[in-house]
Image (spheres, coloured by chain):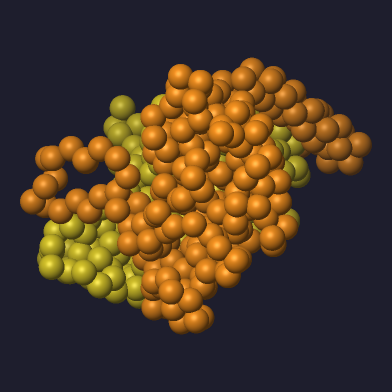
Chain colours: A orange, B yellow
Amino acid sequence: MKLRDNENIAVLGIFLGVIGLLSALVLALISHVTADPIAKAKAAQQAKAISQVLPEFDNKPAELVYETKTASGWSVKFMGAKKEGKLVGVAALCTSSKGYGGNIEMLMGIGVDGKIKAVLITANNETPGLGANICTRAFKKTIFNITKPAPAGLAPNEYLDQFNGKRAGEKTWHVKKNGGEFLYRTGATITSEAVTVLAYEINRAFETNKKEILSKFGGAK
Amino acid sequence: MSKSMNNLIRGIWKENPVFVLLLGTCPTLALTSCATNGIGMGLATTFVLIGSNFVVSCISSIVPKKIRIPVYIVVIATFVTVVDLLMQAYAPASLYEALGIFIPLIVVNCIVLGRAEAFASKNTPIQSIFDAIGMGLGFTVALTLLGSIREFIGTGSVFGVKIITCWTTDFLLPGAAPGAFIIVGAILGLKSYINRRAAIKAGKLYIPPAGLDCRNCRICSIEEEE
């Protein structure tokens, strides 16, 4: 009897098992081969993002790490950026679970003085056209400048740029609607508030752990 | 050759997966909020479709009929994961950034399974590849068209380029799922109208597709054998 018309349950079970095993083997092989290049590609991507929020550096920030928790219990990773052995800034990576569509991951560049240099949202799942506009930095292309190359540096975003040069104090930051001082977008208050609070918590975590971070990174005066 | 050509081009208009077969409505509605997303999802699907159609038509003669669907699903899922891993590892970062989020979604895209069952399992590997390219192109064209229309009505831009520069406030309906339904409906109606006009001009009686059906796909009626 041909395999194609076989209806014996044991044969069918074995056939499915063999197919499953073969796919598992193929996947294991590919996953093993690609593990290294994937890790490298991810590291390169993160290094590129860090270089956008901090001044020029020449070390590998991903290897100089201090991890702690923010006031809300989100784990935050500080990475030190050095130039010629001198600490020029700290990049902080943290994920908030308070977004409208789930998690929002923020990368913040902090100067040695504790002031925010720039903020970048590296992952979000907010509503396209509404909440997502708060999280994305993109140069506006129009038919009049289509051939011009995008200018260097970060594209402006009024919701993210408002944190620049600020330092977290005792009081939590809020958007104007919730009694704070920060801008928000109508219809996307939850996203605005999540980004504002996340920025505060990261910067606050840096303030409270400043001594340990700076001594670990060798930036203490 | 004419058979191959026929397999290649019929996916674009006559049996367009989105506008005629009405397959893959989930990614169609969810991902086409802008033209770039549409073309990205279309190309990623085309790539997976070519691979899965080829593999399925190669193994279809030895797969027992009773368990063909689970076997095809495992093969497609494996292929998609392999493509995902290889792209993460070796593709330029910008390409993976643009296409990466769509790749895992292809596993649950019924166009891939539908073509495996309705075409690849009954035809030669070469013809299956032609069918995959045609269907993939049809899907890409449909998604890009839909994405462009939605993006233009929503924000006044196409492919991220503002066409109407004084348009500053986004119009949210076309970007959301209800707007997508409305626009897909309008395109379906327009396509039906064009087909009907063509039939009347040619002096023929216009017969609409027999209840916008699933054509040759028999996934839902595995138990009934012909």
Q: Quadrant of the C terminus of chain A?
A: top right
Residue B161, position as x, y percentages in the image: 20, 52
Left/right placement of residue B203 relative to residue B213 reads left
Left/right placement of residue B36 relative to residue B152 reads right
Residue B146, position as x, y percentages in the image: 31, 59
Q: Residue most toward the left?
A: A144
Q: Is residue A210 positioned above or below A104 on the image?
A: above
* In front of the other: A209 or B164: A209
Is residue B51 at least partly visible in the picture?
no
Q: Which residue is drawn at 39% across and 71% down?
A: A183
Q: Residue at x 68, y 40 (%)?
A: A212
Left/right placement of residue B171 relative to residue B50 reads left
Residue B160, position as x, y percentages in the image: 25, 52
Q: Is residue A203 positioned above or below B185 on the image?
A: above
| Quarter of image, res A204 | bottom right
Left/right placement of residue B47 relative to residue A209 reads left
Q: Residue at x 83, y 41 (%)?
A: A7
Q: Which residue is drawn at 60% across and 66% down?
A: A170
Q: Residue most toward the right?
A: A10
Is residue A78 at least partly visible in the picture?
yes
Q: In which quarter of the image is the N terminus of chain A?
A: top right
Q: Is residue A206 positioned above or below B99 on the image?
A: below
Q: Is residue A18 positioned above or below B49 on the image?
A: above
* In front of the other: A153 or A26: A153
- How many numbered callouts? 0
Residue B21, position as x, y percentages in the image: 43, 58
